[in-house]
Image (cartoon, rainbow, N blue to C red):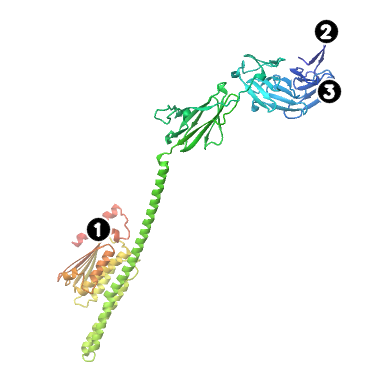
Amino acid sequence: MDGLNLLEDPVAGRFRSWKAEPAGAPQQVTAMVEDSDGELWLDSDTLQRFEPATGRFTAYSIEPGTAGRADRQVSDSLVRIGKRISPGGSFLAIDRGGLLWMATTNGLVRFDRAREQYSTFDQRHGLPDSAVHDILEDRLGRLWVSTAGGLSRFDLRTNTFTNFYEGDGLAGSAFEGYSAATQTRRGQMFFGSKSGLTAFWPEQIVEKRSVPPVVLTEFSLRNVPVTPGSGGVLEQSITSTPSLTLSHDQNLFSIEFAALSYVDPQRNQYRYMLEPLDREWNQVAPNRRIATFTTLPAGSYTLRVQGSNNRGVWNEGGVALHLEVLPPWWGTTWFRTACAGVLLVLLWTGYQLRVRQLHHQFDKTLEARVGERTRIARELHDTLLQSFHGLLLRFETASQLLLDQPAEAKQELDSAIKSAADAITEGRNAVQGLRASTVEGNDLALAIGTLGDELATGANVQPTPEFRVGVEGHPRDLRPIVRDEIYKIAAEALRNSFRHGEAGRVEVEIRYDRDGFRLRVRDDGKGIDQAILAAQGIEGHYGLRGMRERAALIGAKLAVWSEVRAGTEVELQIPAGAVYATARRRSWRSRLSASNMSEDERGDAS
């Protein structure tokens, strides 16, 4: 229809027309409706109100939610103001409250004529499709609108839609024609579609609010359905199972469910939540009634499933399934408790061992101090105290002979002077032996040789005894304390040879082997009686006993061989780990060189 035409004289067939101005403007009117004031509302390119008495048109913009009135006084013409409501046309209706409703391809549009404001309702508000074609109002004041996705009922009080589909009895769900709906005077409605005609009484359509039961239908492990009673995790149907216990390697499983509403099951809705992991519901598609879980950690869970019918009535209670995923044996409480217990035992054992070690170190330190004091006492007893005691006796003898026998007294004094010199030498040696043993690198052979030379010179016998020190093997640094004890043992053996053994020849042999250290002192003196050897020395003398004590202190073996008029031999052997300062591994070249040197030395000695 081009413009607006009014039949003024039906008999004569005379029309009155209103054409658009300016020329060339769109003139098509696709729908109209008359309000209670006798005014016409037109749908052309815009929404327009026409007043037949004055011939006045009022055009309105179509910005939803805004006032869009544009008054324009026209004469005998239809004007276009604003933009099109929607391509493809629309349908107009005025409800009992005076609100104007427009069916558009963008949704259901409401126009408040008093406020001149628009509101649009589309799929976001519950419409099955935004393309609305026809609008009818029933006797209860509800709007029925046909869309491309189904038939909807709109409640003006709550602004909510109730949707109906082919599954509810419609001839078809796709309503695509304009002006294909009507209502009889008795209130029956007819909606036409490509699939046929749908007729119904709106007041007789009662929405069923029944809550559909929700059940679990199938349980699968690794995508394989589990049969109840097959010796697996299910003893009965999953529908009747309140709880499940799974091992740690069964943490990949899926559970299917269903809402028992069969009116239009394709439109049933579902959602699930796994407590305590999920904080919100997981919505699933109606054709995907399954919840799948992968690599679920050990623990206790509750699966809750809710479902709704085709009307969106939800079963808020739903169904719940308690799940228990067992940890592996290394993650169980008893194993962790056992590990904690073992750790505590190890810590306690380590603590006790450390305490024992400290006690042992303290005992060794205390023993070393006591041993040092004993050694000092032994040194003083064997040297200075005995020498001073001998000097005292000689001075007393000289004092007694001084008046009656001056010659003998002088001889006794000379002997006392010699003894005093010997005491000074012994004191010096004792002090040297009590020095701190922390200086490394002392030449043991040189120290023993120096002491032997002094003892040989001070023997006051003619001819002077022969003394020699020999070294075999490659000299190595010795532990300072062990070195000092070796020196003291050698010194005691040399004193015995020169002073008591009356030896004419004394030899000292020092040998550095890979496996240990050896010291040997030999003389050709008068020897020691076997009884004295068995008693470890003469009563009141601690020479032999002191040497054995020193040897035991450093972990060495001491052997003494002697016969009367056949000489004496003292041998000291110490393992390498106890005597050498370092236990470095030498290369095969150095070991071969040392071996060849030892063989050459042995050949020279022989």
Disc 2 marks a residue whose amino acid type is Val
Q: Which residue is mark 3?
A: 73
Q: Nearer the viewer, mark 3 or mark 1?
A: 3
Q: Which residue is mark 1?
A: 597
Answer with mark 3 or mark 1, whichever residue precedes in sequence.
Answer: 3
Between residue 136 and residue 394, name the one nearer to us. 136
Disc 3 marks a residue whose amino acid type is Gln
The label number, if any, that marks residue 549 in the structure image: none
Q: Is residue 360 left or right of residue 163?
A: left
Residue 308 screen position, x and y as percent:
57, 27
Residue 473 screen position, x and y as percent:
25, 60
- How far apart are the two marked residues, 1 and 2, measured between alpha carbons? 152 Å
- How far apart are the two marked residues, 3 and 1, measured between alpha carbons? 134 Å
Q: Is residue 222 left or right of residue 179?
A: left
450 versus 91 height, above or below: below
Answer with mark 2 or mark 3, whichever residue precedes in sequence.
Answer: 2
Residue 522 screen position, x and y as percent:
20, 68
Between residue 484 and residue 321, name the one nearer to us. 321
The tally of labels here is: 3
Answer with mark 1 or mark 2, whichever residue precedes in sequence.
Answer: 2
Considering the image in quadrants, where does the C terminus appear? bottom left
Q: Nearer the viewer, mark 1 or mark 2?
A: 2
Q: Quadrant of residue 385?
A: bottom left
* Element on which disc 2 rests: loop
What residue appears at the point 34 percent right and 70 percent down from the top-left corner?
435
Q: Is residue 132 left or right of residue 259?
A: right
Whether residue 429 is visible: no
Disc 1 marks a residue whose amino acid type is Met
Q: Which residue is mark 2?
A: 11
